[in-house]
Image (spheres, rainbow, N blue to C red):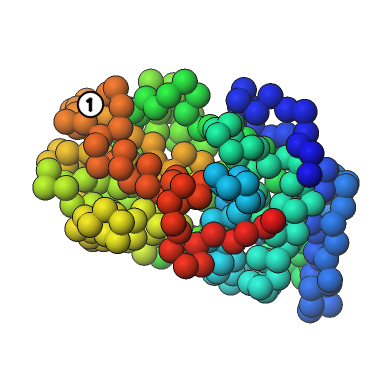
Amino acid sequence: MEKKNIDWSNLGFGYVKTDYRFVSDFKDGKWDEGRMTEDDKVVISECAGVLQYAQTVFEGMKAYTTQDGRIVTFRPDLNASRMADSARRLEMPVFPEDRFIQAVVDTVKANAAYVPPYGSGATLYIRPYMFGSNPVIGVKPADEYQFRIFVTPVGPYFKGGVKPLTIRVSDFDRAAPHGTGHIKAGLNYAMSLHAIMDAHNQGFDENMYLDAGTRTKVEETGGANFLFITKEGKVVTPKSNSILPSITRRSLMYVAKEYLGLEVEEREVYLEEVKDFAECGLCGTAAVISPVGKIVDHGKEICFPSGMEAMGPVTQKLYDTLTGIQMGRLEAPEGWLKVIE
């Protein structure tokens, strides 16, 4: 398929309208067959459940052009499973996981002309989401829902190269111990907006959120999981019931152990031990790994030996290996790449 006339190398990380999106409606207790549409407008009641009580969940994933010219997505089965968990937590009907994967495939295929070519540094971002669509004025779950997927080509997260981030230990809480921190709900991101703007206004790139119960343990940022490297080369990630289970983090931990032969550990990480790590990164779909150079804890600076110029050596190996798998340069574990065409 002939690609769209887009300056792929200069794409930003923003929304570009594409030709088709997938839509399926839930009504009278069941999902319809779904359809592909060119209409990018969502029309709902002014009293829709999503507008009144934020009943919405979403996912984020990517499609890539591999070195041999295939279009693939990365572990969509895990996104399908996580969205099902999110829906259950907000009393929303689960969109069947097999249909989720097929809808992703169909939407990417319909917009294949927007999948950036290999080597451009750009990818196709995929956004599945679901929301309560019928009028709800009393506080209760909606009766009708819409599941949609749109895609948009995006440029590399790091324009002009990787620059390690400076983050702060936040006084705000991201999630309650028995709240919704473990699901991908819009409400979690809405409550983080003030905290991230406050951080930016004070010169920081991101927030480090601590556990709300004791405020002694590292949890995550507003949109990414933490990854630490010890001075001995062990890869450590925080463990908590209120952390979103990142697919990128799980993949990196597997890569660390099975591809790079590193020791890995998921455990509670206390703020007081962060100063002893050699490297730190934030992992997620957008950037894979964003290196952290400095953490500021109320004026006290924690500077990592990896520095403020580039990724640390172990973090770089993790990044290169995972992106190598995603782009087809390295052999992927079975089931990790879903071939679109």
Give x and y (percent) for residue 148.
Answer: 74, 56
Q: Is residue 318 left or right of residue 98?
A: left
Can the viewer see residue 172 in this picture? Answer: no
Give x and y (percent) for residue 266.
Answer: 26, 60
Vertical arrangement, residue 96 with respect to residue 276, above or below: below
Q: Nearer the viewer, residue 224 or 329?
A: 329
Looking at the rendered image, the quarter that the N terminus falls into is top right
State how many labels appear: 1
Looking at the rendered image, the quarter that the C terminus falls into is bottom right
Please, what is the three-letter code of the amino acid marked with disc 1?
A: Gly
Element marked by disc 1: loop
Can the viewer see residue 26 in this picture? Answer: yes
Q: Which residue is mark 1?
A: 307
Q: Residue at x 79, y 56 (%)?
A: 22
Q: Residue at x 78, y 34 (%)?
A: 4
**Dot 1 surroundings within 10 Å: few (below 14), some, or many (20 or more)?**
some
Give x and y (percent) for residue 188.
Answer: 52, 50
Q: Nearer the viewer, residue 197 or 319?
A: 319
Image quadrant of residue 145? Answer: bottom right
Q: Is residue 309 left or right of residue 71?
A: left
Q: Nearer the viewer, residue 307 or 209?
A: 307
Farthest residue toward the bottom?
29
Vertical arrangement, residue 214 with respect to residue 7, above or below: below
Q: Nearer the viewer, residue 287 or 40?
A: 287
Q: Is residue 27 left or right of residue 55?
A: right
Q: Is residue 141 left or right of residue 43?
A: left
Give x and y (percent) for residue 72.
Answer: 61, 54
